[in-house]
Amino acid sequence: MATAVGGSAITITADGGTGSADSSNTGTNHIKVEYADFAAICQVKSFTLDLSREEIDTTVLPCVVSTTGSLASFRTMQAGFATGTGSMEVQFTDDQTNLANRLLGNSMRKNQDGAEVRLFVNTVGTSSTPDLNDSLYIQAPISIMGFSLNVTPEDVIIGSLNFSLSGQPTHLLGN
C-alpha cells in the first residue's frame, strides 16, 4: 500500500505507519485507508446509458355519467420509479495493473459497494482535471453486471461492460 498511485510503500510500524500515514492515537494503532474518489479509465471508447421510468396506472371508475357514450374512456398514468442500465466499450491491454483490466475482475465480485461512474458527455477544463461546474456528466453508483469480449488477432481487444444504476444519481448532466 502507498500514499499515492505509484508512490513509495508505507512501512507498517508499531505506531501505525510512517510519515503522514502514521496516525497513532493514545497507544492504539490506527491506519486510515481511503479509496480515491475517481480514477480515470482512458481506454473507454464509448458508453451507453438508458434511463427509463415505470408507468403507474392511476385509472379510476368515472364519477360522472357519460352523455356522449361514443368515445372510450382513457387510462390515466403517472411516472413511477426510474431504472438505469448501460454499457461501456473498453480497450484492454496486457498490462495487468491497468484500471480497465481490473474492471473485468471486479464484474464478478459479490460485493460491489462503492462502485461509481462519472460518465462525461462534454468535458470542460483548463488542466488535466475536468471542471465539474462546466462539464456535462452523469454520476451514479453502479453494479457491474457482466462483460463480453471481442478478441481477434488483427484488432485491439474490446470489452463491453454491462452495468445498472444501483442508486440515485448524484449528478445528472447540468444539474
Image (cartoon, rainbow, N blue to C red):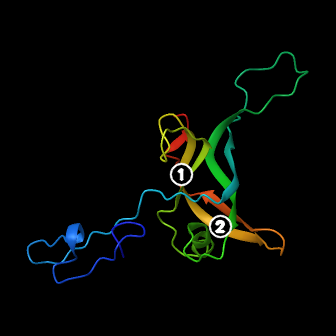
Task: Work out which quarter of the rendered image holds the N terminus and state it.
Answer: bottom left
Q: Amino acid at mark 2?
A: Met
| Outermost residue, right side | 70
Query: Above or below — where is 119 with respect to 69?
Result: below
- Which x, y percent locates residue 44? 66, 57
Q: Is residue 94 left or right of residue 69?
A: left
Q: Nearer the viewer, residue 43 or 149?
A: 43
Q: In the image as oriented, which residue stretches furthest toward the bottom?
A: 14
Number of numbered markers: 2
Up-down relation of residue 45 to residue 102 (above or below): above
Q: Residue at x 76, y 68 (%)?
A: 156
Q: Which callout, 1 or 2, points at the residue further toward the start of the chain?
A: 1
Q: Label 1 vs label 2: CA separation?
A: 15 Å
Q: Is residue 57 left or right of residue 115?
A: right
Which one is nearer the viewer's eye here, 170 or 66?
Answer: 170
The amino acid at mark 1 is: Ala
Residue 123 position within the rendered picture, expressed as x and y whole percent measured from the top left = 57, 41
For image coordinates 68% across by 45% down, the residue present is 52
Pointers 1 and 2 in contact (C-beta within 8 Å): no
Residue under the point 56% across and 75% down: 109
Q: Which residue is mark 2?
A: 145
Residue 36 at x, y percent in the picture? 41, 61
Res. 172 image quadrant = top right
Element at badge 2?
A: strand
Q: Which residue is mark 1?
A: 140
> On the picture, is 35 further left or further right than 144?
left
- Label 1: state its secondary structure: strand
